[in-house]
Amino acid sequence: MRKAQVAMALLASLSIFAASCGDDEKSDSTAAPTTVAEAPDETTGDTTADTSAPDTTPGEVDYMWTPNADLLAGAEGQVNIVAWAGYIEDGSTDPAYDWVTPFTEMTGCAVNTKLGNSSDEMVQLMQSGEYDGVSASGDATQRLISGGEVAEIDVAEYSSYENIFEQLKLQPWNSVDGVPFGIPHGRGANLLVYNTEAFADSAPDSWSAMFEAGGPADGAVSVYDSPIYIADAALYLMAHNPELGITNPYALDQTQFDAAVALLEQQAALTSQYWALYTDQQASLEDGSVLAGTTWQVIVNLAQGNGALIDAVKPVEGATGWSDTWMLASNAANPNCMKLWMDWIASPWANAQVAVWFGEAPSNALACTLADMADHCATFHAEEDDYWSDVWYWTTATEQCLDGRNDVTCVGYTEWVNAWTALRA
């Protein structure tokens, strides 16, 4: 996440096959998560102490969320959102996955979605001023904040914020000086996928399978096609070339940056595919033309479900990853509906739905307590703090070094884009 186009190919997702990063544990639950949480106190109208939905009759879903009364009173009737594909589902792709309809029924806010196919596109769309909010990855959030396209939030308006995993709050990609600029959505690690037949003698546990010549995947490596992938090369150098002094793959001075680009140029000779559309990599994994690559768990799940002879692992060097953020446009025409949406999508039931559909760890800790969510949260390591300790979430590189150095200038994201464009020319 963040990051690509996940709605269409998931229409065939009758079950999610869980790859569990190197083991063969599986979860076959696709039913809408349910819960027996109690309803809020109807005598007080409290919408913050208890976020359960009003009483439900047998067979109905308890959505575990009550709209903020003040926001509801001012709801504009619609909201226009820029989002990653798969983050806003209304049941038209798969009737089992619909978190738009209940939101509209509870709030009166119709949801209009504009899909963003890349972080760069999302930034451009938000700069148009036509949208009320966005689901932004860490390589877009700081650009939106610094450009004034998004606004800080008052967490008191969002009942769901309290139950967000603490590791995701007030991070460099979603806050400034301790002030939150959005609500964390979910997270995932960029994994190493490999063909189990090609690596039958020894399963890889290092990114060297993609960066060093002489391995089973030579000439059949699949690389994520984005400037942010430069951080993956920096991460590898951080472990294998400590003399460079890299401590944060998004904080690279010119020498460190040049070394990362040189490694990517070396990798190009081993590479058969640069993918941006996730279905492209999925197809290559299934037909065996890709033998190793950087991937997302959802791609592994889908390809394995179609019989691909693959597995995936988070390598010993750690990994890059994403933690997306729902952000409010600073000039939103429908701010109340957008705030309601942000609170809803981060609430336990809705957050569980999108986490299963997209294939990621939910951001709301209560999502993992819902029926049928235990296996999913285990597969995606949602509650394992240690698992995320060496995952470097996508972050926009700035000239002010993000690793705290003040004696040098780091290479800003514009130069990352220029270098990647030259590499891919």
Image (spheres, rainbow, N blue to C red):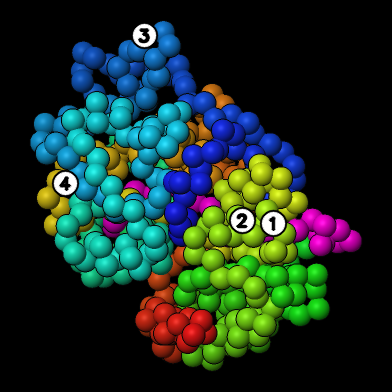
Whether the magenta-drawn stretch holds residue 201 is answered as yes
Label number found at residue 335:
4
How dense is the environment of label 4, judged by Cα within 10 Å: few (below 14), some, or many (20 and up)? many
Please report the residue visible at 71 percent of the width from the left and 45 percent of the height from the top. Answer: 307
- Identify whether 245 is placed above or below 106: below
Q: Are marks 1 and 2 in contact (CB under 8 Å)?
A: yes
Please report the residue visible at 80 percent of the width from the left and 70 percent of the height from the top. Answer: 216
- Identify whether 119 is placed above or below 304: below
Secondary-structure class at tag 3: loop
Q: Label 1: which residue?
A: 287
Given the image, on which type of amino acid does mark 2 rest? Ala
Q: Label 3: which residue?
A: 57
Asked if residue 199 can be seen in this view, the reply is yes
Report the front residue among 129 and 178.
129
Report the front residue among 304 and 343.
304
Whether the magenta-drawn stretch holds residue 72 is answered as no
Cα separation between marks 3 and 2: 44 Å
Label number found at residue 313:
none
Look at discs 3 and 1 and give the one toward the viewer.
1
333 vs 226, left or right, is: left
How dense is the environment of label 2, judged by Cα within 10 Å: few (below 14), some, or many (20 and up)? some
Cα separation between marks 1 and 2: 6 Å
Secondary-structure class at tag 2: helix
How dense is the environment of label 1, judged by Cα within 10 Å: few (below 14), some, or many (20 and up)? few
- The magenta region covers 178-203
Q: Label 2: which residue?
A: 283
Q: Are marks 4 and 1 in contact (CB under 8 Å)?
A: no
Which of the two discs, 4 and 2, labels the residue nearer the N terminus? Answer: 2
Given the image, on which type of amino acid does mark 1 rest? Asp
Picture quarter containing residue 128? bottom left
| Residue 336: x %, y % from top left | 16, 41
Look at discs 4 and 1 and give the one toward the viewer.
1
